[in-house]
Structures are given as C-alpha cells and as structure tokens.
Image: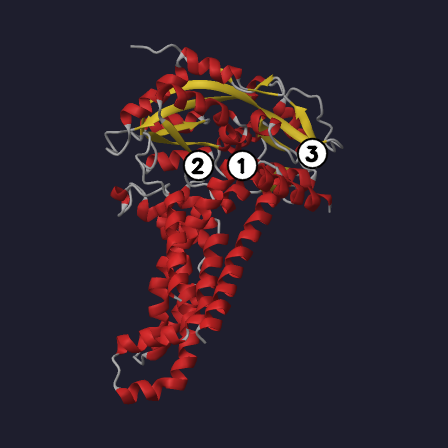
Amino acid sequence: MRPLLRAAAIGWLLLSAAAFPAVAEPPFITVASTTSTEESGLFGYLLPAFTKETGIDVRVVAVGTGQALKIGERGDCDVVFVHDRPAELAFVEHGFGIDRREVMYNDFVLIGPASDPAHVDGGTDIVAALRKIADAKAPFVARGDDSGTSKAELRFWKEAGLDPRTIGAGWYRDTGSGMGPTLNTAAAMEGYTLSDRGTWLNFKNRQNLKIVVQGDRRLLNQYGVMLVNPARYPSVKQDLGYKFINWLTSPTGQTTIADFKINGEQLFFPDAKPATG
Amino acid sequence: MHGIADALVAAWQLILSGNSTLLGIVFLSLGVSLTAVLFASCIGLPLGAALATTRFPGRNAAVLTVNALMGLPPVVVGLVVYLALSRSGPLGSLGLLFTPGAMVIAQVVLATPIVAAVARQIVEDLWREYAELYLFDGVSRVRTICSLLWLGRFSLTTAVLAGAGRAVAEVGAILIVGGNIAGVTRTMTTAIALETSRGDLALALGLGIILLALIFLINGTAHFAGRAVKRVAP
C-alpha cells in the first residue's frame, strides 16, 4: 500500500503543479465581453497582438452583453467590451463604468433556410422581412437572453409594430441561449434567426441555412469598451485596463481589427474617434 | 451517423497532434477535479462514517439531507459560489472568481455529498457487523471511524470514484465560476460546450471521446491498483 500511496501523492502533486502554475504570473486583466467577439475569432487574432506589444495577458469571459454588463456591475472584471449602446450608456450613467469609447462596428444579418417559406431572400429591409415572417408564421428562433443581438432583434420587431411574444405562439421560439446554440437550433428547425455576421461566418454547422437579408443601415452593430469604475471597486486594474482601452482605440489596434478577415472578408470595421483631451 | 465517424477522426487527430492547448486543458481538468475530490474525500469519508456509527436525534434527517444533496443542480451551485466569490459578495476580497480555485470550490460542494452518502452506506454495513466488538473494547469514536474507514477501504474506492465522476463531468457550475477563459479556466467540459456553440460538432464530440477515455483511465487505474494491493496484502 505504501509505495502506491506515495505514487498517487506524487502524481497528484505533479498534476496540480501543471494545473495551477505557481510561477510569477504575467500581469493580466479580466475583460467581460460578448460571444460574438470570441466566437467569431476576433479575440484570437487581436489579443495576442496586444499581449505581444504590452506583455499584458487578457482573460476574456465571453457571455451575452447583458451578463457581461452584470459582471462589470458586480466588479468582477476590469473592462467591459460589448455591443448595446443604450445599455452601455445606462451602465456609465449609473456609475458602474467610466470612459466609454466606441471601437468598431459590424452588422447583423438575417439567416434563414434555403427553402425560404416567408419569401424574404434577397431583401434589404429587415423590418419588412420580419413582417413577412410573422405573416407566414415561419419558424423564428430568438436568442431571448438579454444579449445585444437579442435587444436589437426586439427593437426591429417593435419597429415592425409586432410583439412576437404575444402573436408568436407556435412559430416564435425563444431559446434563451448564445448565438451559436441559437444557430444550431435554427439549423435543426429550418428557422429564421438574427445573427451578427462574425459568428455566422465562423459557424460550422450551417446545414441549409444562408443569409437572406443584409445591408439595411439599421442592421449596423456598434461595439463600445469601458473601464469598470475603480472608484466603486478598488480591485479594478485601472492602469492595465486603460492600456487595453487605449490600445484598442489607437491606430495600431484599429488597424489590427480591420486586418481580421475570414475567407478574405473583413468582419469588424474600426470607428474609434481620436482621443479627446 | 457520419457525425460520429467525423468525431472519432477529430478525436484521433487531436491526440496524434499532441496539441499543447489540448494537453493544457486535460491537465487543468484533471488537476481541478482531482484536487476537488481530495478535499471532498477528506470531508465526505469521515462525515459518512460518523453518520453511519452515531445515533443522535435528527440523524434520519441528516442522512436524508446528505442523500438529497447528491442531486444538487450544478448550475445552482455555480450561481451560489459565484455570488459568494464575486467582488460584491462576502468572499470577494479573495479575488478567486474566474480562477481554477473557484472551480475547485464548486466541485467540492458538488462531490462531497456523493462521497459522504456512499461512504455512509458502506460503513453502516460494516458497523452492523462489528459494532459489538468496538463497543466491547471501548474504542474511542474517532479511532472507530478511522478503523472502519480502513477496513472498508476497497469498497470506499467506489465512493471516491463516484465523487470524481461527478467532478470531472460537470460543466454547469465551473462555466459560471470559472468563466471558460482560454488557457486559465477552460476545461474539457467547458471546451466541449464552447465548440458546440461554435457549431463545430465533430471537434466537440471528439473532445467528449477524449474525456470519456480519461474517465476510463482513472477508473481502470483505481480498479487495478485495488486488485494489486489486495493480492499483496489480502
């Protein structure tokens, strides 16, 4: 028994050493961000460039915009990087965040099955397309998770003068999940869904889905970055956080964002304004 | 069915490539879960043995509670541990949220009731057999518990393995308290969840096959180690 016990103890120690490196960690910040930036592959391309230049590691917790803002509200991250302007402005106004800066935009696209039961393929008017889907009672798969995409989708329904939660029985499916799982569901149900372009381009399980509506100006999707208020939470790494925000909005950061492409297609369009004051 | 064939190919390619990211994820999964099981066993085994050998008012309620806690929903445990470790929570100053330490805590909470409940059952059977002996000799309670745990060590492996299975396989709790941060808190199960979101079902299932193989390896090691020891010292 003894040698076996000793072997087990040594094995466990080695494993823990591998799992929890005790060596001095490089400085890092925690960023709460959205699934669209992570799942599209942008962070995989962008963050190594930042780390190489500054030596700062970026730990990304990728969740929906609503949850990311919540993590910031509780002081559990240093920087929030999301896409829902009204919610971001409220976040700053309530004193949870400071120095919001716009970073980039991309766009939403309406995804639908190739069979296109609502006859919306090729359109450029998102609101008209939603009306047609409602008329046809074609399956529509919604995020329903308080994410930026979910809020944008609900805004478009409102513009169409429809409330899918009251008229949608039988065809409007609220999945309460992230963009990827929602696309998985849409693929399985042959349904329509609103997606950000980045996640769609990087999504592998498309089956019969394709882009049916794009190019509407209302589909533009603005991303903003802000520091969690250090006056509220002293644990916030203010200096490192600012380095990240300043780098994202600097010419280098902006060029790196523009350089990120999938199949030759640019996904995010930098639009940071030059720093003022 | 071609989905499963794709997954097998993906799993095999991952293993062959000796991918360092994959190795990191595997080590983190094992490190976190085995650490959690170590703590869960240190708490659960004595607790189970104590419940088995002691008579006190409310004992039935205590046994029922431990048994019921085996069904703790991981996502609820994750949420409670998250609220406790959050900067706005009571343990916020520790700065443990979104670290492997937070994942260990959540898994200890999940695995301990399982270890305790199974241990109680095993030790209770032994106690029924030997109670008179211990009572006659006037052995102290602590020594009785230690002695019974040693006596039942081979059967108690099952209790520990059940706890390990729960820890290494769950995703709901560690996704919330770990945050699935690449290279820091991304384990086998959270990586599978992520690849499923990305729609890369073959890679997700491939990772699942590797995880299953690891669980087999852990159980096999425990099984054969137990047999080897039994043969040397029956």
- Residue tagged 2: B183
Other residues around mark 2 within 10 Å, as few (<14) / some (14–19) / many (≥20): few
Q: Secondary structure at mark 2?
A: loop
Q: Is residue A135 left or right of residue B56?
A: right
Position in image of residue B210 (x %, y %) = 57, 48
Give the amino acid at mark 3. Answer: Asp
The chain containing the residue under callout 2 comes to: B
Looking at the rendered structure, whether the residues under marks 2 and 3 are on a common chain is answered as no
Between the residue at mark 3 and the residue at mark 1, the CA separation in whole angstroms equals 50 Å
Q: Name which of mark 2 and mark 1 comes first in the sequence.
A: 1
Position in image of residue B47 (x %, y %) = 34, 69
Other residues around mark 3 within 10 Å, as few (<14) / some (14–19) / many (≥20): few
Between the residue at mark 2 and the residue at mark 3, the CA separation in whole angstroms equals 47 Å
Can you tell which of label 3 and label 1 is closer to the viewer?
1
Q: Is residue A112 left or right of residue B90?
A: right
Is A49 situated above or below B195? Answer: above
Image disc number at residue A135: 3
Looking at the rendered structure, whether the residues under marks 2 and 1 are on a common chain is answered as yes
Give the amino acid at mark 1. Answer: Asn
Which residue is more in the foreground, A104 or A244?
A: A244
Which residue reaches farthest right?
Answer: A115
Give the amino acid at mark 2. Answer: Gly
Between the residue at mark 2 and the residue at mark 1, the CA separation in whole angstroms equals 13 Å
Position in image of residue B123 (x %, y %) = 40, 76
Q: Is residue A3 left or right of residue A215?
A: left
- Residue tagged 1: B19
